[in-house]
Image: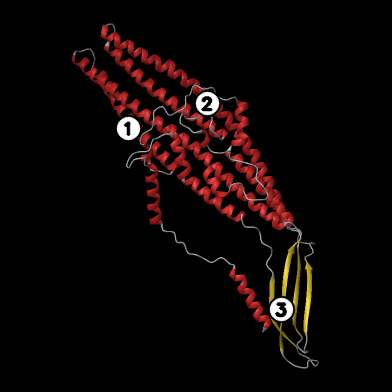
Amino acid sequence: MRSTRGFSVAVLLAAWGCTTYEKKPLRPDDLLEQVRRTRALAAEGPAAGEAAPATFGKAAELLREHSPALARARAAYRVALDLADVSTPLPNPGIEVGPEFGFGPAVVAHRVEPVGSLSFAIPLSARLARQDDLNRLEAAAAQVELLVRHREEYLRLRRAWAAAVLARRERAVAAELIALSKRSAEFGRKLVEVGEATALDLGLLELDLARAETGELDARIGDVEASADLASISGVAPEAFSALPAESLPALDVPVPAMEEVTGLLVANHPELARLRAAYDVAEGALRLEISKQIPDFRFGVTGGGETGDLKYVLGLTLGIDIPIFDRNQQEVARALARREEVRTQYESALADALAALERARARLVLLLEKASAVRNRVLGRAKSQLDLALKGLEAGGVEALQVLETERSYRNASIEALAVEKAARAAWIDLEEAVGRPLLFFPDEMPERRPPEPYTEPKESGRLDGGADSVTREA
């Protein structure tokens, strides 16, 4: 009976420290209302109902605070960090109790005696420390993922911001072209009335007007899509970007960094390379853990009970260890070795792909910048000069009206071409930034101290990660 009571007390004491379950239901309707409220509040300005100042710096702050992608990465990091904060415990002791029966001719009294044992396992290797190290490395990899995702979303925000500003500019150009086409069509009607133009000429002018109007609709569609992209990336309502400053983009007339410079930046900043370096550290930690598991645990215990045929008690001591003759954890060690080599190969392949993408992006950017400069200075500039000369000649009577209309058409086409090539050049700059993994041009209102941190730092094998989840949340 005393052994049974001791067993019951031990079980109760063990259960006392266990975590209890607390129900926390997921309520979709409540969460939907919360998300709507957060998006609307984030889009408000300092006064009620006033739109927040639409600057890129403000957009970057909204991204940091409300981005759904960053929220998911933070949640995953907190899970890994919480696990890393819990040290790997020693193996649980074992307790066993049961009855012991005695029979045979030498038994004086037939009775049942309780018997029990208490055993412990002591790791002889650094298995527990290696498991702690692996948990910390996995938390460091989750931290890298958070920082890398922040950098990726930051570059996406730059692309979406440039697209939104250019979409507003495209709407302005479309409105200007509509006004010009209306003037040309009205002028063509007057020429038809005086017999200096045909109905066919007027039809072509009205066709140009219809195309300009549909082009304005395309520009409005692009504006809506660009604002929606900004809102989606930042995690706020589109009203936060209802007004964008026209001069909020960096100038394009800057030298492209040399290939050696961007190659040097690539290794430290490329997102996929940072992920794979963190994965390689995890693979190293997993290999060290599996190798430590080859050494078995040392076991010892005590046993006690009464003699079933005699009035005496027996106390014993047991010592034991597995002999690693057959099972030396060969399969898991082989798996860990292969995984480490797999990540190394992935890193080499990713580095080769990243270098090829970088070379392509830089070469394309150089040519697009040259084309943008030529279109802006030669094509658009010359078309504008020709239009001014044609209008002056028309007033002086030295230029025919149809020549003026043709010159206006050339100017409209040049304006559309100039905007299209500027969009392509700015997209090529962002392609180069994404190929490197960090910004290379900076917006006028961009705050350098609030740019995303470097995506990868060397992990630690012991001790808590610097700053913990809260500091990463603030930095990222």
Q: CA distance from mark 2 to mark 1?
A: 29 Å
Chain-order first, disc 3 or disc 2: 3
Q: Is residue 41 left or right of residue 152?
A: left
| Residue, disc 2 | 365
The answer to whether the residue labelled 1 contacts the one labelled 3, judged by CB atoms less than 8 Å apart, is: no
Residue closest to the eye, 416 or 188: 416
Residue closest to the eye, 377 or 202: 377
Q: Nearer the viewer, mark 3 or mark 2?
A: 3
Q: Is residue 386 above or below residue 470?
A: above
Please tell me how crowded label 1 is: few (under 14), some (14-19), or many (20+) other residues with Cα within 10 Å.
some
Question: How far across and down, in percent of the image, does residue 304 sit?
Answer: 75, 79
Is there any visible trace of residue 437 in the rendered image?
A: yes
Mark 1: secondary structure: helix
Colour pattern: secondary structure
Q: Is residue 60 above or below residue 405?
A: below
Amino acid at circle 2: Leu
Q: Which mark is residue 116?
A: 3
